[in-house]
Amino acid sequence: MCKAIWRGRVAKKANLGYNGKKEQDGGRRGMEHGQAGACFREVDALKAALAARRPFTQGELQRLRDEFLIEYTYNSNAIEGNTLTLRETALVLEGVTIDRKPLKDHLEAVGHRDAFFYVQDLVGQKIPFSESVVKQIHALVLMDRPRDRGIYRRIPVRIAGAYHTPPEPLLVPEQMERLIAAFAQDEARHPIEKAALFHLEFEGIHPFVDGNGRTGRLILNLMLMQAGYPPVNVKYADRQRYYAAFDAYFQHRQATPMLAILREQLEETLRRLNDML
């Protein structure tokens, strides 16, 4: 269990937190050095076991990617209110128009697909994470809103039903710059914890007027894939637990629920991949 290894107090020497502020007692909690390995030991063991097996063929990889992309696009968009079913999402990605479904829903599916292809290219080409990457992912996601694509919001926003209120628009560029810099400098933290903390803070900033959830989950997978892990697919059926993980972080200063979601998803995926070989 990850819960048992979270520290109650941070060291007296303040650390630069992922929110760009100095951590103090009661601030966002991180794991003590080396303890994240215990939390993700099973994930890393499964990852190593997969690497030791025969590689998937190109055809096998393509089939797995295609299946994942359909389910991932369906779930990530459904969490944000898209009305396409899983089957309809698959058809739209094949170029079929669904009767009596909004054009917006079609564009969201295509945009999410293109953004995931871009993420795959970033991983394959080993392109480092940056602010321009964030904006390009968002620009692809927001295919239906050309005037807002890749542009930080200029108006205040609220997240319906959430405990946390995102910062005022004037603070967004600075907070995003600090968040990305903190991520780049945080070399000691376990990559899964690092990706989870970035995801929590990114959604807290809510830098864009729309598309933050889809963009944030794509960035999360970019970070996991760059670290050698498979992408995760947060299910629409699990959305309440996913929302609760953000409230736990911003209300109770605990990242444990989000870490648990990622750990469970990664273990499930890696076990399934190992069983195929």
Image (cartoon, helix red, strand yellow):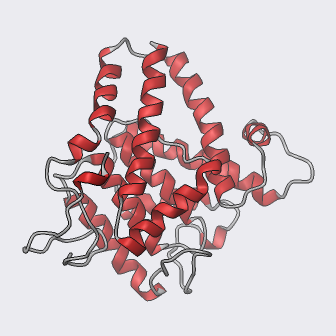
Residue 128 in view: no
Residue 116: percent from left, percent from top: 54, 45
Q: Name the image quarter holding the C terminus.
A: top left
Position of 37 with respect to 109 (left or right) is left
Where on the picture, by quarter, is residue 94?
top right
Rendering coords of residue 126 (x, y %): 33, 41
Q: Position of residue 4 (x, y in %)?
A: 26, 52
Quarter where residue 146 is shown: bottom right
What residue is shown at x 57% (from left), y 82% (from top)? 157
Look at the image and tell me in which quarter the N terminus lies.
top left
Q: Is residue 233 left or right of residue 228?
A: right
Image height check: is 44 above or below 237?
above
Give the answer, above or below, for where 106 lies relative to 144.
Answer: above
Q: Quadrant of residue 131?
A: bottom left
Residue farthest to the front, as pictured: 4
Relative placement, left or right, of 204 versus 158 is: left
Q: Residue drawn at (31%, 20%), measured in percent from left and top?
A: 49
